[in-house]
Image: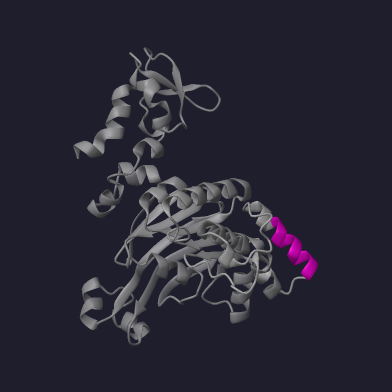
Amino acid sequence: MSAEVQIKCRNIWKIFGDNPKRFMKRHKGAPTPEALKEAGYIGAVQDVSFDVHAGEILIIMGLSGSGKSTLIRCITRLNDPTAGEMEYEGRDLLKVSERELIDIRRHKMGMVFQSFGLLPNRDVLENVAFPLEVQGMDKAERVQRAKDMIELVGLQGRESYFPRELSGGQQQRVGIARSLAVEPDIWFLDEPFSALDPLIRAEMQDEFMRLQQKLKKTIVFITHDFEEATKLADRIGIMKDGRMVQLDTPEQIVLNPADDYVAEFARNAPRERIVSVGTIMKPIDPSAEGTVLVSEKIGSVAQQVLTANRPMGVVDEAGQIIGSVTREDVATTIFTRDAA
């Protein structure tokens, strides 16, 4: 991925226990899981390194207790890491002053959490405008900005409603509008949809993708739902016991899991909606008849390919043939998990 790096994390540790920095020094910055356990420390995040690229949706996932939420709290410095290095647009996040950190959070970062955190005594407009009020923005300007955000998330007409008068999905939209009101450069979302029922959750996922297509934010999104991750992510990082086990595209995680733990997440993934034609295509076959687009997901072309008597050509966006795909390629990709 060639996009500009907005956040750089290197060898991040977050250890809970008595004097964790002294413990880290004693173990030369790299304690083993056994050493942590023996000394009674909790290694919530252990030696994690990754970059967040401008404009991407990076999803961090894992089972409960895997360290995913602790990691995002380290990046935003809601919890300071025990060790490691973090940069935001080239600035050392661990060396900025408290005032600089507050300024970055207020003007550069937007945050949405599982608990909506709405102010019950303020209506929708006032809730969305609240972070702008904290910034000291002029009232007329912040009211207009809040109205724009409310319209963006589809809640126009409900500006004067109080949180108790809204559904769970509507409350979450208010939380999203509030976080976007500050026009953040990077957007952090920690299990934002997990408290919603399945139908509203699916609706909010679609709304999220609509917003992203329009706003093109840099997003770090935490979830424990693999299908949600594959639907939304450009890349997925899977954590286990505080460590990043694999960081890759949804396609590669499904097709080439790093270990059995990752494979278990991917076992029932909807491959037909995740894997693209370009990932499974073979070299150009002169006998091919008909064409499919390289960027299409295999589910959208499966009927066409599976009913063809010959391989089909694969074309790029310019219409040039760049490969071929057979019904065996499609069938094997979709049904491999059943044979596993």
**Residue 125: x percent and y percent?**
68, 64
Q: What residue lies at 43% left-to-right and 75% top-to-bottom?
A: 81
Give the vertical position of 237 relative to 65 (above or below): above
Give the vertical position of 317 relative to 204 (above or below): above
Question: Which quarter of the figure is the C terminus placed in?
Answer: top left
Q: Main secondary structure of the magenta part?
A: helix
Over which residues does the magenta segment extend?
A: 139-148
Q: What residue lies at 23% left-to-right and 52% top-to-bottom?
A: 260
Give the vertical position of 101 relative to 154 (above or below): below
Q: Residue furthest front?
A: 165
Number of callouts? 0
Observer-nearest of 110 and 166 = 166
**Residue 150: x percent and y percent?**
66, 57
Observer-nearest of 242 and 126 = 126
Q: Is residue 210 visible?
A: yes
Q: What residue lies at 56% left-to-right and 51% top-to-bottom?
A: 55
**Residue 160: x percent and y percent?**
68, 64
Residue 180 horizontal side relative to residue 52, left or right:
right
Q: Give the quarter of the image for residue 302.
A: top left
**Residue 278: x percent and y percent?**
42, 32
**Magenta segment includes 102:** no
**Magenta segment includes 140:** yes
